[in-house]
Image (cartoon, helix red, strand yellow):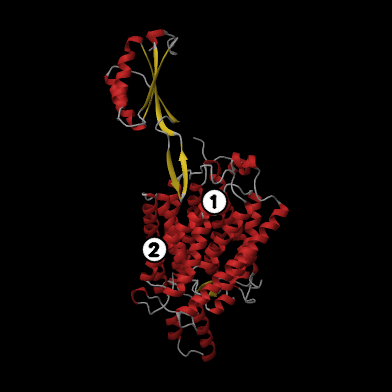
Amino acid sequence: MNSLNRNKMKSFTFFIGVVLAPTSLLAGELGASELSTGNTAWILTSTALVLFMTLPGLALFYGGLVGTKNVLSVLMQCFSITAVISVLWLIGLYSMAFSEGTAFVGGLSKAMLNGVTLDSLSGDIPESVFFMFQMTFAIITPALIVGAFAERMKFNAMLLFSILWAIFVYAPICHWVWGGGWLQQMGLLDFAGGTVVHVTAGIAALVTALVMGKRSGFPNVARPPHNLTMTVTGAGMLWVGWFGFNGGSALGANGTAGMAMLVTHISASGGVISWSLMEVKKYGKPSVLGAVTGMVAGLGTITPASGFVGPGGALLIGLIAGVVCFYATNYIKNVLHIDDSLDVFPVHGVGGIIGTLMAGIFCSPALGVFSGFGFAQGIDSISSQVYVQAVGVLATGTYTGVATFAILKVVALITPLRVSEDEETEGLDISQHEERGYYL
Amino acid sequence: MKKIEAIIKPFKLEDVKTALKEGGFFGLTVAEVKGFGKQMGHTELYRGAEYQIDFVSKLMLTLVVDDDMRDKAIEIIVEAANTGKIGDGKIFVSSVEEVVRIRTGETGSQAL
């Protein structure tokens, strides 16, 4: 979400309240307190697009990357996370993230959407629509982490972990950055979730992979993706869905939304091209999996920057994302031998980190063709903005790392995190769900 | 009667089948198989993770012929399946004790 616009909007509402804006023309022009049907229509659409990213986009993307014996487990994890987080979002997570509270977490005044009626507005869209739009972000973030522990986590442990993680990591950090919390007040630019979604999911993935340990046989046993066609299908849905993710984060149907969609698309394209070129340079051939991974890197990296940078900046961000995430993936897997099964940290985590930092550079209006649309309120230089961005990355990353570790330890007291070795060999589809993905 | 089992490159199936039909052979069974010989496997690379794939996909054709047709069948397969490159496959020939046509109960050469 656009913290810049929200701040402006808040102060504007305040202005109206105090000065008693004389004409309805003024209020109508700026749309501060009246429902905008155009904006509402776009956020309704964006909500559908972002849910589509998880179901079936991410589910297919991940499902194709695992083995035949684990394909259903990944689909089931994405599906059940969607259902469970949605209910939690209604019960209390939305309130923790977006209602009045401290600088660190919201209160429970909007638990069960208490007091929210058909006429309640958030900005100039119905609060129900804002609730739904934000809910889809709360769903996809824990769903992204699935890639780190794929093919070895017990289903009940996964559910418990996801629930606690949404409560103790996602909701508070969402409040810090978008709900009026301390990072928002500091002027952190995170348009659509570089810190809230990608840094948190990426760091949690890294910690989870380390705590859970490697899949048996890693890295010596071959684990090729069982269906790259499925993965590319899911990747295509992610690309399209991301238009709602970033474009919708303008919370309006306006120039910011249009530009966010444009830079999102350019960055994704840049990521595809640079990752593919890296593969050609290192291995001689560009792979399909490399191309779609570069796309995700480009999309994840532009996410925090998408409402603040221009097309030139977006192109550089996408190209840089493909190269940096390519090296990060190789380094994590082949040098550190960390079994982050589907490379969530090197793609989303690293992408979220460099994207959040680069948002602080390319938002500058003084970079010629690479200019963006300005710093946060009260900030007037690249260095001060990048400093705030770095604080945002460090704070969200550190808190996520510590909290994720603690949550895993608590879950482990209740149920083993991993399936037994026999169950892992048999596959999670049979051992956890008693069904098979394929009867061929 | 002889059983001829030929392991060939998958994309040569149409050529071999056509040549056999033109040579007067009717009846052919095909199975998808994996294996390795001198060709060995190949490597596959997924996001920097390199895997050695030892088993290469091939097709195995099985046909049973009368003794006097043995050499002709082998000749046709060798010619049609040949690319001159490593990995063209092999042909195994063995004797068959009995053949029975299930529908009629005929046996031996008549059942072929």
Q: Position of residue A197 (x, y in %)?
A: 53, 64
Secondary structure found at label 1: loop
Q: CA distance from mark 2 to mark 1?
A: 24 Å
Q: Position of residue A257 (x, y in %)?
A: 42, 70
Would you name the residue on which mark 2 appears? A319
Mark 2 burial class by Cα count in 10 Å: few <14, some 14-19, many 20+: many
Tag 2: residue type?
Leu
Quarter in which the N terminus of chain B is drawn: top left
What chain is tagged by disc 2? A
Is residue A424 toward the left or the right of residue B33 in the image? right
Q: Position of residue A42 (x, y in %)?
A: 44, 67
Relative to A66, residue B15 above or below? above
Would you name the residue on which mark 1 appears? A341
Which residue sits at x=32%, y=14%?
B71
Disc 2 and disc 1 on one polypeptide chain: yes
Is residue A277 toward the left or the right of residue A198 in the image? left
Q: Evaluate whether residue B108 shows in this view.
A: yes
Tag 1: residue type?
Ser
On residue A196, the disc is: none
Secondary structure found at label 2: helix
What chain is tagged by disc 1? A
Q: Evaluate whether residue A254 shows in this view.
A: no
Which residue sits at x=51%, y=66%?
A353
Marks 2 & 1, CB-CB < 8 Å contact: no
Single out the residue that lies furthest toward the right.
A413
Mark 1 burial class by Cα count in 10 Å: few <14, some 14-19, many 20+: many
- Front residue of A408/B104: it is A408
- Front residue of A384/A417: it is A384
Which circle's residue, 2 or 1, is located before the other in the chain? 2
Q: Position of residue A396 (x, y in %)?
A: 58, 69
